[in-house]
Amino acid sequence: MADLSNKTALITGGASGLGKAIATKYLHANATVIICDINPSRIEETTSQISALGTGTLRAYTVDITSLDAVHDLFAKIRDEFGTSAPDILVNNAGIMDRFDPVGDLDPGLWDRVMKVNLTAPFWLSKLAVEGWLAGEKEGCILNIASVAGNVGLAAGAAYTASKHGLIGLTKNTSSFYINKNIRCNALVMGAMETNVSDAFHAGINQEGYQKMEALMKAAGTALCNVDEVADLCVWVAGGRGAGLVNGAVISVDRGWGSVMG
């Protein structure tokens, strides 16, 4: 496993699912880990479960990343506590699902909510991180958790699909623009996992949209991605041997599902 000693990592949506798994692996890799999540009970539970793991240090904050003021406050806390202009590693993991609605059925409020969490918040967080790295003349690493829905059309509804297409575009632009500034930006294009991203659509989903996605997934015959294995990959991208060569990559992590669908 890569050694992330002397590295500070901020993981959004870090109190459950993939974010929690990434935080756990980063702690075992000796990083100082900062998780934020909108759910205070999950923050409390996760802190009690993983804070003593590994040799890294854990800090946890309840933050609504759709609030720009809250994001600024989070970075101020990081500066005050750790004396750094920005965390060395930013993992834009937090995300919410839509309800598989196509554009004709989509509620504008749900569109706005999905875009704020899945695309606008990563933009804000990336902006503050990049500003800090440039000001401090530091190396930086952004890892965006995207989705196969960012490459194809029927893996989700219109809102989620558009948000993940946008996140992949943000990844490519960021990596390209700062290519000579020691700032790397990559995206993992995730297939299906058992995480709480599905909390948002347990009730009231668009059955037609969901059934179309489900039929494609069954036709591919692929298993769900193991969250711990994905987290191991996130450690390598952040600081593994040879990872410095990887910039602007859109890495499929889906057991080939995207190839079948695309």
Image: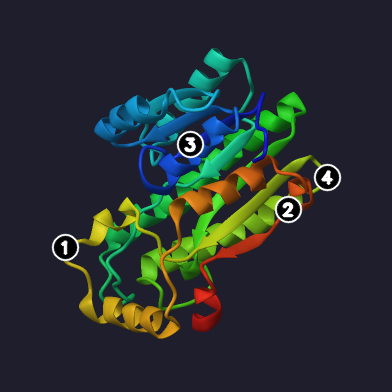
Label 4, label 2: how many angstroms apart (C-alpha)? 11 Å
Q: Secondary structure at mark 2?
A: loop
Label 4, label 3: how many angstroms apart (C-alpha)? 29 Å
Query: Of the residues tagged 2 and 3, which is closer to the observer?
Result: 3
- Could you tell whether 143 is left or right of 212 in the image? right
Indicate whether 258 appears above or below 49.
Answer: below
Which is nearer the N-term, disc 4 or disc 3?
Answer: 3
Query: Of the residues tagged 1 and 4, which is closer to the observer?
Result: 1
Q: How many marks?
A: 4
Residue type indicated by callout 3: Ala
Q: Quadrant of residue 100?
A: bottom left
**Disc sitting over residue 203 in the figure:** 1
Q: Residue at x 45, y 39 (%)?
A: 12
- Could you tell whether 51 is left or right of 43 in the image? right
Label 2, label 3: how many angstroms apart (C-alpha)? 22 Å
Report the residue marked by disc 4. Answer: 180
